[in-house]
């Protein structure tokens, strides 16, 4: 499932993002989503973002 996220960017970054998206022939939001996903995956690969912990059996029973 996809989720929407709203971000505020400095004008110069937004202009660069729009220019880059236009060069690639894609919507600005699509490029932004790709860049966020790429950044998260790189953080996971480097160990900067640890994997999610699985809920314990006790936590699962409480739901």
Image (cartoon, rainbow, N blue to C red):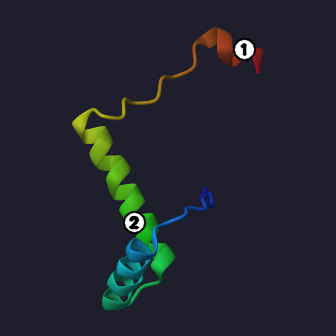
**Badge 1 or badge 2: first in the primary sequence:** 2
Residue 60, picture quadrant: top right
Q: Secondary structure at mark 1?
A: helix
Q: Position of residue 46 (x, y in %)?
A: 23, 38
The residue shown at (42%, 85%) is 26
Q: Position of residue 36 (x, y in %)?
A: 41, 58
Could you give the CA–CA distance between mark 1 and mark 2, rounded to whole angstroms? Answer: 36 Å
Q: How many marks?
A: 2
Task: Judge whether 8 appears above or below 31 on screen.
Answer: above
Q: Nearer the viewer, residue 39 or 15?
A: 15
Task: Judge whether 25 appears above or below 61 on screen.
Answer: below
- Furthest toward the front, the residue is 11
Q: Secondary structure at mark 2?
A: helix
Q: Position of residue 20 (x, y in %)?
A: 32, 82
Q: Position of residue 35 (x, y in %)?
A: 36, 63
Locate residue 37 relative to residue 44 in the image: left or right: right
The residue shown at (46%, 65%) is 33
Tag nearer the camera, 1 or 2: 2
Which disc is residue 51 wearing?
Answer: none
Query: Which residue has dot 2 on it?
Result: 34
The residue shown at (36%, 34%) is 49
Query: Which residue has dot 1 on it?
Result: 61
Within 10 Å of disc 1 (Cα), the crowding (few <14, some 14-19, many 20+) is: few
Task: Judge whether 35 appears above or below 48 on screen.
Answer: below
Quadrant location, the N terminus = bottom right
- Furthest toward the left, the residue is 46
């Amino acid at each position: 499932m996809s989720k929407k996220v709203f971000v505020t960017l400095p004008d110069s970054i937004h202009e660069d993002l729009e220019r880059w998206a236009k060069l690639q022939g894609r919507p600005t939001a699509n490029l932004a989503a790709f860049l966020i996903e790429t950044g998260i995956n790189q953080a996971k690969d480097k160990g900067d973002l640890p994997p999610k912990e699985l809920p314990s059996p006790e936590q699962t029973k409480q739901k």
